[in-house]
Image (cartoon, grey):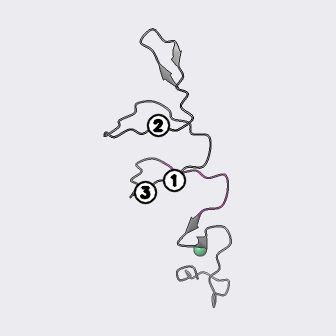
Amino acid sequence: MLKLPDGRPLKITAPAGVTIEAAVAITGDVKVKGKTALDGDITLTGRLTASDDVLAAGKSLQRHTHPGVQPGGGSSGPPK
Ligand SMILES: [Fe+2]
């Protein structure tokens, strides 16, 4: 929610959508409610926390396996 200089909140209601054609810099916390699609590379300098599984090129971070690996002190190969 945008805030006016005096601190009052500014609410934008636009059922047909809003398009911003500009470089945008935001200082402060951002909360998005709803599905979000980003078209482009993302660079993150902080920690990424997900409450659900994460997929990387279709591979589940929680459920991927490392076939051919037996328990022991060695390291496995990449996920399959
Ligand atoms: Fe793994």
Mark 1 = which residue? 37
User: Was residue 55 drawn as part of the magenta stretch in this picture?
Assistant: no
Mark 3 = which residue? 39
- Tell me: residue 71, above or below residue 25: below
Q: Nearer the viewer, residue 29 or 21?
A: 21
Q: Quadrant of ligand 1?
A: bottom right
- Mark before the other along the chain sequence, 2 or 3: 2
Instruction: Decide whether the magenta segment is chiefly helix, strand or loop.
Output: loop
Q: Which residues are magenta?
A: 47-54
- For the point 34% across and 40% down, which residue is it? 21
Looking at the image, the residue that sits furthest to the left is 23
- Tell me: residue 12, above or below residue 38: above
Q: Are dots 1 and 3 in contact, CB under 8 Å?
A: yes
Q: Tell me residue 64's x, y (percent).
A: 64, 75
Q: CA distance from mark 1 to mark 3?
A: 7 Å
- What secondary structure is marked by label 1? loop
Q: Is mark 3 within 8 Å of ligand 1?
A: no
- Tell me: residue 36, above or below residue 11: below
Q: Residues within 10 Å of mark 3 (few under 14, many from 20)?
A: few
Mark 2 = which residue? 18
Q: Amino acid at mark 3?
A: Asp
Q: Where residue 10 is drawn, which disc sits there?
A: none
